[in-house]
């Protein structure tokens, strides 16, 4: 396992540093921009790119690029919501996401305001819908960016740090331990499990703020009055 993992990490590190930064920027940009974030694994791109970090200057550069990419993607989502929000919501892709998810996003934003912007960065589906929903709301861009920037910074710090820590730990142990590869895998898996548990805990605690009256009412095919 060590040989295969060493080859993989060396391959990532052999990529030009500037190109790695570009990949990370583009990956997180699409992950946080309108709806594309539902299909582009930007977090995976960031994790992989971060395994090639060798020192603190590279760490700072990667962190800055990932935060910039996240904010750029969120800003694009906000702008598209401001200009084309209703049209996107009622498009084929928008309908595929389900009206319930759109209602949850708008209800959550209406009830929690800036807190919804911050928290949604860590929640599935909502992290792609909230920027667009904010664009359709009266919230100003300045307030939106003030709430989403710290969330993006926290998210980026976690993923970049874990990628660097996992690869660095493996490289220090590879020559001494035959099972060093399992240390790398364990760090990544533990981080992903913790991230999943945190997301679920946040979603449970915030669920009541997302509930829309129409979602609570039982569906029926009977006409009113019957």
Image (cartoon, rainbow, N blue to C red):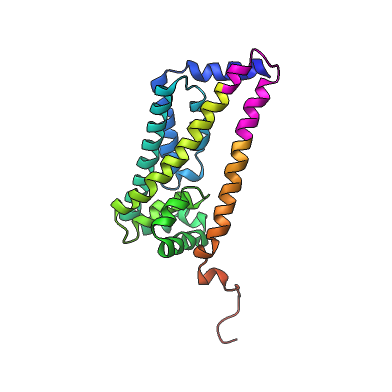
Residue 192 percent location from the top left of the image: 60, 39
In this orientation, does residue 80 appear?
no
Residue 101 percent location from the top left of the image: 51, 59
Predominant secondary structure, magenta span:
helix
| Residue at the image point whose x is 49% and y is 27% from the top | 50
| Position of the N terminus by quadrant | top right
Q: Quadrant of residue 187?
A: top right
Name the residue nearer the viewer: 218 or 141.
Answer: 141
Q: Quadrant of residue 55?
A: top left
Residue at the right extreme of this rendering: 178
Name the residue nearer the viewer: 200 or 124.
Answer: 200
* Number of numbered discs visible in the structure rendering: 0
Residue at the top extreme of this rendering: 175
Q: Which residues are magenta?
A: 169-189
| Residue at the image point whose x is 65% and y is 15% from the top | 3
Q: With 223 as the anchor, is 131 left or right in this view?
A: left
| Residue at the image point whose x is 47% and y is 22% from the top | 53
Residue 121 percent location from the top left of the image: 46, 48
Figure check: 114 above or below 16: below
| Residue at the image point whose x is 61% and y is 75% from the top | 220
| Position of the C terminus by quadrant | bottom right
Name the residue nearer the viewer: 97 or 122.
Answer: 122
Magenta span contains residue 198: no
Residue 215 percent location from the top left of the image: 55, 68
């Amino acid at each position: 396992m060590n040989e295969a993992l060493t080859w993989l990490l060396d391959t990532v590190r052999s990529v030009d540093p500037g190109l790695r930064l570009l990949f990370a920027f583009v990956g997180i940009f699409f992950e946080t921009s309108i709806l594309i974030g539902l299909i582009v694994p930007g977090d995976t791109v960031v994790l992989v790119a971060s395994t090639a970090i060798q020192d603190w200057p590279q760490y700072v550069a990667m962190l800055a690029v990932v935060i910039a990419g996240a904010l750029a993607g969120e800003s694009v989502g906000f702008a598209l919501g401001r200009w084309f929000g209703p049209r996107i919501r009622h498009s084929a892709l928008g309908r595929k996401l389900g009206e319930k998810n759109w209602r949850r996003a708008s209800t959550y934003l209406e009830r929690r305001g800036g807190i919804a912007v911050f928290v949604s960065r860590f929640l599935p589906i909502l992290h792609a819908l909230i920027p667009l929903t904010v664009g359709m709301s009266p919230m100003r861009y300045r307030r939106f960016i003030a709430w989403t920037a710290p969330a993006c910074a926290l998210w980026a710090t976690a993923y970049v740090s874990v990628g660097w820590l996992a690869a660095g730990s493996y490289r220090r142990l590879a020559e001494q331990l035959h099972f060093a590869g399992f240390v790398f895998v364990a760090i990544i898996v533990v981080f992903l499990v913790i991230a999943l548990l945190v997301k679920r805990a946040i979603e449970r605690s915030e669920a009541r703020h997302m509930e829309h009256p129409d979602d609570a009412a039982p569906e029926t095919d009977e006409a009113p009055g019957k």
